[in-house]
Image (cartoon, rainbow, N blue to C red):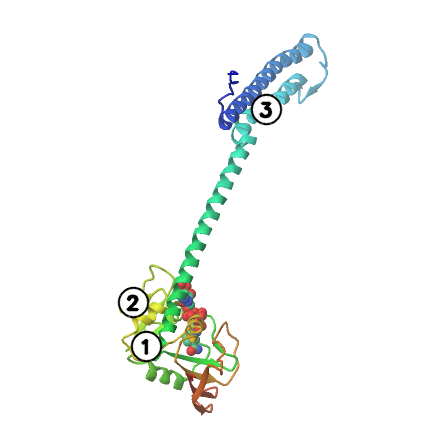
Amino acid sequence: MFERKKKTPQIDKDQLALIEHAQQRIKQKKRLYIHFVIFLIGSLFFILFNIGLGFGNDFKILETDWFVFAILGWLFLFIYHFFNVFVTHKFMGKDWEKAQLAKLVAKQHERIEQLKQNLIKEETQIAQNEAKNRKYSNNKQNKHFELTLIVAAAENDAIGKDNQLIWHLSNDLKRFKTLTSNHHIIMGRKTFESFPKPLPNRTHIVITRQENYKAPEGVIIVNTLADALDAAKSDKQPFIIGGGEIYREAMTFADKIELTRVHHEFEADTFFPKIDMSVWKETENVLHEKDDKHNYAYSFITYERR
Ligand SMILES: NC(=O)c1ccc[n+]([C@@H]2O[C@H](COP(=O)([O-])OP(=O)(O)OC[C@H]3O[C@@H](n4cnc5c(N)ncnc54)[C@H](OP(=O)(O)O)[C@@H]3O)[C@@H](O)[C@H]2O)c1
């Protein structure tokens, strides 16, 4: 009834591996020792054969008895064996490979875990931003300012290349200055970095996902568009001045677009989103032909939300 329980050995896997490793090392060293003894005896035999019994007395290499070369050759093999046991197998044997592999796998696991955590963090951040933006667009009725997108875009909606503007139209710059002076200008980090220095008479609000982004004094740094709008709430007409990423995000709840349409097509890497005419209505459109100072014809167009 009360059968005695069979005792199971209390050795874990690591201990077992250590024992196996130790046994293997002992075997390797034993073999090396035997090799050494055989080498000594073998060398004595060579000498005995050659000098004692006169075997191959006439055979010399470089005026030297053959047994010297035979012993040297064997000695070389023995040294190779010795090196294998004490260097190669000790540091780079199968166990060493296994340990390296385990380390590598552990590192990969760690990295995957870190990426997962970052992804969760980013997803949470995106969800929070979207919620903030939704809150902002739902509250549009109560808001007391007119959010205006100001942009110069080509016929193919090109707005920039290599973080620079593509054309120089002095009247467009003048219009930009007139409209935005004494207002808050909201921009993406890349657009901000395309300026040599902050523009005078305007409050700059720069959007970035970076936590410790450094900017000159007076420049407001925020992490979301919703926070940018919060920072500009004292202004009756804050401007979104680009670039492509920020226009796309702000287009869904902006009230007005001040567009300079440049009547030409350009190669670019940044584009203004398509203006959906079921959402926007054109309220002003003034064409300017090209002249000495302007290489392209352009139109100043105002759109208001329907
Ligand atoms: N023709 C025009 O009227 C006009 C006007 C303005 C700019 N541009 C041109 O447009 C190009 C730049 O536009 P772009 O689209 O490459 O860059 P951008 O919109 O100026 O800036 C993009 C950066 O803004 C930050 N950002 C974007 N969305 C965000 C969000 N939801 N939350 C937090 N941060 C956010 C990120 O900064 P971090 O990477 O730091 O996180 C992102 O890398 C340049 O070529 C410029 O010359 C043209």
Q: Residue 142 carries which label?
A: 1
Mark 1 or 3, closer to the camera: 1
Q: Report the residue marked by disc 2.
A: 216
Ligand 1 shown in quarter: bottom left
Q: How crowded is mark 1: few (under 14 residues within 10 Å), some or many (20 or more)?
A: few
The residue sitting at 36% across, 69% down in the picture is 226
Q: Residue 52 carries which label?
A: none
Q: Is residue 230 visible?
A: yes
Q: Which amino acid does label 2 sit on?
A: Pro
Q: In which quarter of the image is residue 256?
A: bottom left
Q: Which amino acid does label 3 sit on?
A: His
Q: Where is residue 292 in the image (x, y as percent from the top left)?
A: 44, 90
Spatial CA distance of label 1 from label 3 is 87 Å
The residue sitting at 51% across, 41% down in the picture is 105
Vertical relation: 265 (above or below) 16: below
Q: In which quarter of the image is residue 88?
A: top right
* Residues tagged 2 and 3 counted as in contact (Cβ below 8 A): no
Q: Which of marks 1 and 2 is nearer the N terminus?
A: 1
Q: Report the residue marked by disc 3.
A: 81
Task: Report whether the residue tagged 2 is closer than 8 Å to ligand 1.
Answer: no
Left or right of 2, for residue 208: left
Spatial CA distance of label 2 from label 3 is 68 Å
- Of residue 108 and residue 29, the one placed in the foreground of this image is 108
Q: Position of residue 293 (x, y in %)?
A: 42, 88
Q: Position of residue 230 (x, y in %)?
A: 31, 70
Q: Which residue lies furthest to the front in this view?
A: 1
In terms of secondary structure, where does tag 3 sit?
helix
Q: Which amino acid does label 1 sit on?
A: Asn
Vertical relation: 241 (above or below) 100: below
